[in-house]
Amino acid sequence: MKTDLILAHLGMGTGRTQPFDQVYSKGEYIRPEDIRDGMELDALVVWGGEDISPSLYGDRVADLCGAGASLSQRDRVEAAAMAEAIERGIPIIGVCRGAQLLCAVAGGRLIQHVDGHTRNHSITTYDGRKIISSSVHHQMMYPFDVDHKMIAWATDKRSNVYIIGNNESDPLMKHHVEPEIVWFPKIKGLAIQGHPEFHNPTDEFVGYCMDLVRKFILGEEV
């Protein structure tokens, strides 16, 4: 098994390679064309930041959405990088905005506004753990219509609204958990809504995220 693993980033958003440097030994700043041209790398990480355009997932812009109907420059760069990575079979780690973009690229959509997700809270994992995750977002992944594995969700529903493009609350969310970590197997995408880069590197949430990378992306026993 390869041990000298390379993690690429786009130089945008809330992080670069930490704390995923606990798994990947080298970080590289890249452009989408570097992936297309065959640059050697083992995974791409896309970080947190502003809202993505709802046009990426076929919705109108709700009043409470912070993005416009047209793609921003960052939308274009990150979506292009993800497309190139998917074409080459390179795994992708998405954090916060990056997780939401992964959901859209996988064929899912977003809830454009939720409340109650601006402070740390408990998440429940598929393997029966309860962990405190950071939370600094007002949009939410909606992966339920595409192939996915729900890895973690908010232990207690925190939002009273799930606003979509018609400025109304999505009635389908009454049937679903609030996603926190999702694996999209067809595109090898690990979508993490919380911010491991905001935690102490030794925190349980960070350790759990590293274990997910090892298990789902590297195929290791953890």
Image (spheres, rainbow, N blue to C red):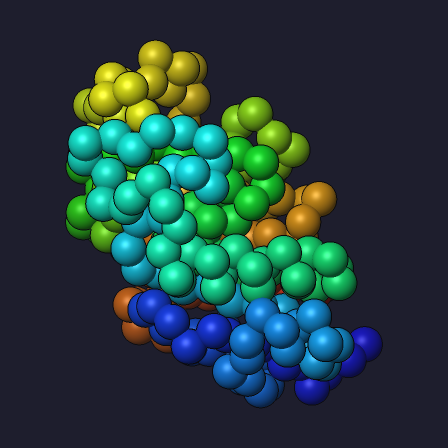
Residue occupying image coordinates x 70% and y 80%:
39
In this view, the residue in front, 39 or 14, is 39
Residue occupying image coordinates x 40% and y 50%:
71
Tell me residue 11's x, y (percent): 42, 77
Q: Is residue 4 visible?
A: yes
Task: For the C terminus, give its image quadrant.
Answer: bottom right
Residue 183: quadrant of the picture: top right
Q: Is residue 109 above or below residue 15?
A: above
In this view, the residue in front, 171 or 133, is 171
In this view, the residue in front, 124 or 33, is 33
Tell me residue 17's x, y (percent): 46, 77
Tell me residue 185's x, y (percent): 68, 45
Q: Is residue 63 above or below residue 15?
A: above
Residue occupying image coordinates x 42% and y 56%:
75
Residue occupying image coordinates x 40% and y 29%:
59
Residue 168: quadrant of the picture: top left
Q: Locate residue 15 relative to residue 216 in the image: left or right.
A: left
